Amino acid sequence: MNYLSFRRLLVIVVVAMAVASGCAKIERESRSLKLDQAVRLYADSIRWGSFDIAAGLLRRRDGGAISATVKVPADVRVTAYTSNILSVNEVRSEAMVATRFDYYFPDSNKVRTVSQTDLWWFDPDTAHWYMDGELPDFRP
């Protein structure tokens, strides 16, 4: 192999590494954006009473069934929420997310708060994030 051939090969290897690095960065940013969107969709759905949409984002990472023990009362009114992504583990495609909901019931004048911290995980088969947890337990 002469010097010119070696130099071309080196350039090809460097370019391939740069492209691969760029693709990995784009993939991480895409997953991060999808996590933000999924967390926002979950909290917005709870806020506006679309519990069926929120429940669609629940899936056990180990494939187990989601418990149906928490029933959301039909008359709960969520007034506000906050969501914070506490940590992200890119290697395991997981994130810990804390969400807090302020709510009340029409027959009461007391605003209550329910908080949850749950594991969110990325499913490469569907390219979506899911929460490994339950719907909030809104108690009167």
Image (cartoon, rainbow, N blue to C red):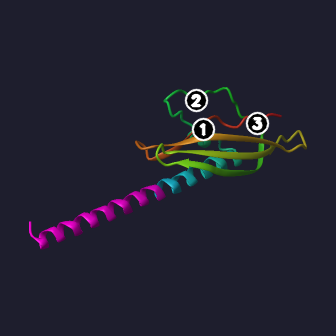
Residue closer to the observer: 42 or 95: 95
Q: CA distance from mark 3 to mark 1?
A: 15 Å
Q: CA distance from mark 2 to mark 1?
A: 9 Å
Pick whichever of labels 2 and 1 is earlier in the sequence: 1
Choose top left, top right, bottom left or bottom right for residue 96.
top right
Element class at badge 3: loop
What is the CA distance from the residue labelled 2 to the residue labelled 3? 17 Å
The kind of residue on which mark 2 rests is: Ile
Asked if the residues shown at circle 2 and circle 1 are in contact, with their CB atoms under 8 angstroms apart, the answer is yes
**Mark 3 = which residue?**
138
- In this picture, which residue range is highlighted in magenta? 1-29
Q: Residue at x 53, y 33 (%)?
A: 60
- Residue at image position (49%, 30%) is 62
Please say if the residues under marks 3 and 1 sit with CB atoms less than 8 Å apart: no
Q: Which residue is mark 1?
A: 55
Q: Residue furthest bottom?
A: 4
Residue type, numbered disc 1: Ala
Q: Decide which of tag 3 and tag 1 comes sooner along the chain.
A: 1
Image quadrant occupied by the C terminus: top right
**Which residue is denoted by mark 2 in the rendering?**
66
Q: Residue at x 77, y 40 (%)?
A: 76
Q: Amino acid type of disc 3?
A: Phe
The residue most toward the right is 109
